[in-house]
Image (tube, rainbow, N blue to C red):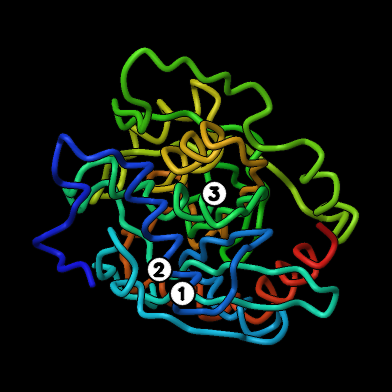
Amino acid sequence: MTDIHDNPLDDPNADPFQVAALAAADIARLSGVEKHDIALTLGSGWGKAADLLGETVATIPATEATGFSKPALEGHVGTLRSILTPTGTRVLVIGARTHYYEGHGVRRVVHSVRTAAATGARIMVLTNGAGGIRETWKPGQPVLISDHVNLTADSPLEGANFVDLTDLYSARLRDIARNVDPSLDEGVYTQFRGPHYETPAEVQMAKAIGGHIVGMSTALEAIAAREAGMEILGFSLITNLAAGIQKTPLSHAEVIEAGREAEPVISALLARVVEAL
């Protein structure tokens, strides 16, 4: 078990990939499942998808796996779940996301993704709740992530490690998702550091540099997933229109409520997409 104040990833001399391998071994031991095929990180509003994917083989408190910390945010469940789909696919559902704004460092932020890769997963599905810049979008609407802008001024890559991010969010997987639901729109996700919401001026900056979605997760995880050789599919649930687009003040309670209302529909959509992967 990893205590939140005694995490091996906090040791600058630790190899984060070795820690991920230890976590994957913990998951295999605790779940009885040697290898997973697909991994999902379920953000705000997406949690019920796990119930629709198939048979839950094991549910593990995330802190039982090396390097994982208890989630700091309401709406994240803090478990790792191994699911067997009707078609025989093994899915690892990650309900324990460490956000950059928690201040634990980028290694902890991307540990779940690296662990997923170490379990054998070749596809990483990243989901989040986020603010929308396009005025045609409505709260409760799911959109595909086509690309991202990383405004954290950080990277999970260490040393002279040059990773190509062309087609980071797989066009092939997005096509599969649109075959499941042709009405899906897509846009460029912009990750800010948080935890404060963006100002109206910052939202306009994101729009000017090509962003359509603003949030506080996902981009760093996607980079780590690409480094690990995974194919990535990204979904944002538009929980609200971004500051200055929406005329009322933003609140976390609003995000949680929008996710709760949309959860049955978007969870069913995600389950159908995973089945098609």
129 sits left or right of 184 in the view? left
Q: Nearer the viewer, mark 2 or mark 3?
A: 2
Real-space Cα distance between discs 1 and 2?
Answer: 5 Å
Give the residue at x 85% y 51%. Answer: 176
Query: Residue 5: x percent and y percent?
Result: 9, 62
Q: Residue at x 28, y 40 (%)?
A: 106
The picture quadrant where one finds residue 165 is top right
Look at the numbered discs 3 and 1 and tell me whether their residues touch, using CB distance below 8 Å: no
Q: In the drawing, what numbered circle is on residue 29?
A: 1
Q: What is the residue that sits farthest to the left in this orientation?
A: 5
Name the amino acid, label 2: Asp
Q: CA distance from mark 3 to mark 1?
A: 16 Å
Q: How many marks?
A: 3
What amino acid type should be assigned to the residue bearing mark 3?
Ala
**Which numbered tag is attached to residue 193?**
none
- Please state if 105 lies on the left or on the right of 126 as rendered: left
Looking at this view, is 174 or 139 the one in front? 174
Q: Judge the density around disc 1: few (<14), some (14-19), many (≥20) Cα neighbours within 10 Å.
A: few
Image quadrant occupied by the C terminus: bottom right
Which residue bears the numbered disc 3?
Answer: 117
Q: Is mark 1 in CB contact (under 8 Å) with mark 2?
A: yes
**x, y percentage for residue 55?**
69, 87
Instruction: Residue at 32%, 24% (x, y): give it.
Output: 158
Give the SS element for disc 1.
Answer: helix
- Quadrant in the picture for residue 73: bottom left
Q: From the image, state whether disc 3 or disc 1 is nearer to you.
A: 1
Residue at image x 53%, y 39%?
189
Image position, residue 125 (x, y; %): 62, 54
**Residue on which the image places disc 2:** 26
